[in-house]
């Protein structure tokens, strides 16, 4: 090999390694699964793990997994979340804590009222990235008790709100419900329906049984997450 060729060869090796790392970061590796280091957890297994974690949280028996500086370094080049959680931006509803999950376990999207708006490309694109690129098998739309966005939608005084808040509240779907807790559940159901239908590729995975979309409500008093059917 002539010395003049060396810089180009080294550059090719460097770029090849960078491409490998980039592709690896997007692969659905799920290496953190408690079920098996080589098998991705199913949606049902993932959902059970989340509910088990919530039970630990409620009983003050948390294990707080993967939260050390070493865990941060280990996941610097790739991620393998087990579930997408579309939750409310409310400061009292942190999914990693209430499900007793660790760094890299959840792909969290938070917006007031846990809204999935077809016009909001940030939320839709984030869900699609987690499912189509990272291989996440489960999406959970998570509402919570005493939700201010839903309460504002029921209040009937949206016109007095600032324009940006008024637009957000107008997207809350309460159906015909007047009771706050029932309206919160109705808004979650609407979010689940939107998550299934808003992106054609996700809808196809739902129809094929490769993606599960569920709804739940977190109770601020008891700490319990309850499924919404």
Image (cartoon, helix red, strand yellow):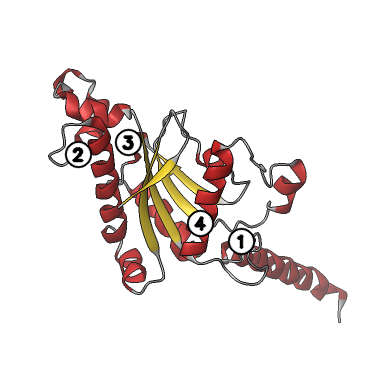
**Mark 2 or mark 4: which is in front?**
4
Q: Badge 2 is on which residue? A: 174
| N-term-proximal mark, 1 vs 3 | 1
* Alpha carbon separation for disc pair 1 and 3: 31 Å
Q: Is residue 6 above or below residue 111?
A: below
* Alpha carbon separation for disc pair 1 and 4: 26 Å
Answer yes or no: is residue 114 visible. Answer: yes
Identify the mark at residue 48; answer none if there is no mark.
4
The residue tagged with tag 3: helix, strand or loop? Answer: helix
* Alpha carbon separation for disc pair 2 and 1: 39 Å
Which residue in the rendered view is the most extreme toward the bottom? Answer: 1
The image quarter in which residue 147 lies? top left
Picture coordinates of residue 37, whole percent (x, y):
68, 68
Label 4: few (<14), some or many (≥20) within 10 Å?
few
**Mark 1 or mark 3: which is in front?**
3
Identify the mark at residue 25; answer none if there is no mark.
1
The residue tagged with tag 1: helix, strand or loop? Answer: helix
């Amino acid at each position: 090999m002539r010395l003049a060729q060396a810089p180009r060869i080294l550059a090719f090796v460097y770029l090849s390694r960078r491409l490998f790392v980039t592709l690896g970061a997007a692969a659905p590796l799920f290496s953190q699964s408690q079920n098996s280091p080589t098998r991705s957890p199913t949606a049902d297994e993932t959902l059970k793990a989340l509910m088990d974690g919530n039970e630990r949280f409620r009983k003050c028996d948390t294990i707080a997994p993967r939260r050390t500086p070493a865990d941060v370094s280990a996941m610097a080049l790739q991620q393998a979340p087990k579930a997408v959680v579309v939750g409310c931006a409310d400061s009292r509803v942190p999914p990693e804590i209430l499900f007793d999950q660790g760094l890299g376990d959840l792909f969290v999207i938070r917006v007031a009222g846990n809204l999935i708006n077809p016009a909001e490309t940030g939320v839709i694109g984030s869900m699609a990235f987690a499912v189509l690129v990272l291989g996440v098998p489960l999406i959970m739309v998570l509402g919570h008790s005493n939700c201010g966005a839903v309460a504002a939608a029921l209040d009937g005084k949206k016109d007095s709100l600032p324009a940006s808040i008024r637009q957000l509240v107008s997207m809350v779907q309460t159906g015909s419900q007047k009771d706050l807790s029932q309206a919160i559940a109705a808004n979650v159901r609407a979010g689940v329906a939107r998550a299934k239908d808003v992106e054609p590729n996700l809808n196809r995975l739902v129809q094929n049984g490769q993606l599960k979309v569920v709804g739940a409500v977190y109770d601020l008093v008891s700490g319990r997450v309850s499924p919404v059917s």
